[in-house]
Amino acid sequence: MIKIRVFRAIDDIESCQKYLEGHVRVLKIFGITMITSANIEWFYDPNTYVIIAESEDGVKVYGGARIQIANSTFPLPIETAVEEFDSSIHELVNRLAENGGTGELCGLWNSREVAGYGLGSIYLGRVGVAIAKFLNLNSLFALCAPSTVKNCMQVGFKVETSLGNEGLFYYPKEDLLATAVILKDVVQLSSADPFERECIFDLRLNPRQTTIQDSAKGEMKIEFDLVIPHK
């Protein structure tokens, strides 16, 4: 069984470290050694929330993601990543922050051990969008690898064509392409795939639940605990 839970970064530094170590291992597999979402500043940001997928006993970490809420102290990872290529990212973030609050779903990864079960490609994305409402955000950014753009669009994101080259950037290195996307309708998810929308709404209504999920590699039991401590 895999347990997916959410916590504020500053409330569980030990779990932040486990999450980061797993993320860095995955990045190194793809030859990526420098990426803005893999620093440790966010450990001490009271506006960063971590989604972690772990074993039932909490010993193994199978994947995770973060939501960082835009604030004046810590720039969003997407701002640091693309500002050299398009400085208008700062104006866009500031405008959306003032218009009901914005943040970024970032640092999403899963280990090879659970590859093929849809943990990173499906479930962590759903959880990120689900809890964005709990964090009182109206919008949400993400910077996607080519393989994850479709999944992001299914949960309601759209390519932000005002940035870069119609939303495209070479990042985190010159031979890799990233796409800037924004979910501008966190609450209603009007652009989401109907099935994904239903799944996300169910997680919001029932933030603590255990389900059996089918995948290409067989069944996977997931225990969700999306009630954020100290929120």
Image (tube, helix red, strand yellow):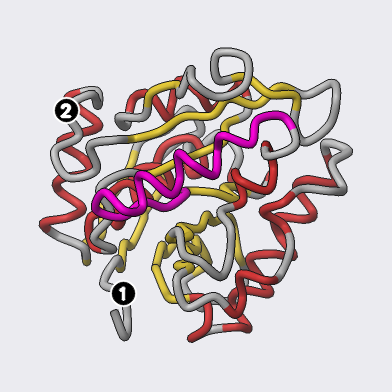
Q: Amino acid at mark 1?
A: Ile
In the picture, the disc for residue 51 is: none
Q: Against 179, is 43 above or below?
A: below
Residue stretch rendered in magenta on the structure? 85-104
Q: Against 61, is 186 above or below?
A: above
Q: Which residue is mark 2?
A: 190
| Residue at 48% across, 60% down | 68
Q: Against 135, is 30 above or below?
A: above
Q: Tell me where residue 115 appears, x and y as whole percent.
A: 61, 39
Q: Which residue is mark 1?
A: 228
Closer to the chain start, of discs 1 and 2, is: 2
Measure the alpha-carbon separation of dots 1 and 2: 25 Å
Residues 1 and 169: in front is 169
Residue 224 can be seen in this image: yes
Is residue 23 rendered magenta in the image?
no
| Residue at 21% across, 63% down | 207
* 133 relative to 117 in the view: left or right: left
Q: Quadrant of the C terminus?
A: bottom left
Q: Quadrant of the N terminus?
A: bottom left
* 35 relative to 33 in the view: left or right: left
Q: Residues within 10 Å of mark 1 (few under 14, many from 20)?
A: some
Q: Tell me where residue 164 appears, x and y as whole percent.
A: 62, 21
